[in-house]
Image: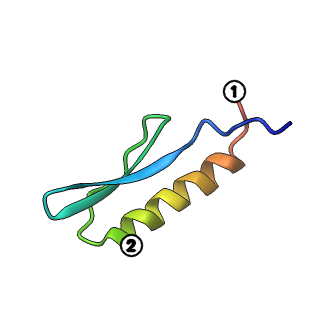
């Protein structure tokens, strides 16, 4: 059985800005582009998967 990753990312909008957030507490920078916020989220997940577990 696969262990579920503790990193679940979403994007949220605040006014005219979008930002990525993760269940681990990480928050990406505010972006005017939703696509850029999604890219930030994907990059965080990829980096988190490569990091060794504590």
Q: Are marks 1 and 2 in contact (CB under 8 Å)?
A: no
Q: Secondary structure at mark 1?
A: loop
The vertical placement of 39 against 44, above or below, is below
Mark 1 against mark 2, which lies toward the viewer? 2
Between 9 and 43, the one lying in front of the other is 9
Furthest residue toward left: 15
Residue 54's disc number? 1
Q: Picture quarter containing residue 38? A: bottom left
**Mark before the other along the chain sequence, 1 or 2:** 2
Furthest residue toward front: 1
- The percent position of residue 5, horizontal first and vertical second, equals 66, 39
Q: Secondary structure at mark 2?
A: helix
Quadrant in which the N terminus is drawn: top right
Quadrant in which the C terminus is drawn: top right
Furthest residue toward top: 54
- The percent position of residue 32, horizontal first and vertical second, equals 23, 69
- The percent position of residue 19, horizontal first and vertical second, equals 32, 56
**Residue wearing tag 2:** 35
Q: Is residue 40 left or right of residue 16?
A: right
Task: Mark 1: give few (<14), some (14-19) or many (20+) Cα within 10 Å.
Answer: few
């Amino acid at each position: 059985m696969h262990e579920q990753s503790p990193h679940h990312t979403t994007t949220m909008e605040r006014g005219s800005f979008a930002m990525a957030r993760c269940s681990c507490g990480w928050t990406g920078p505010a972006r005017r582009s939703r696509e850029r916020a999604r890219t930030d989220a994907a990059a965080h997940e990829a980096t988190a998967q490569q990091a060794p577990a504590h």
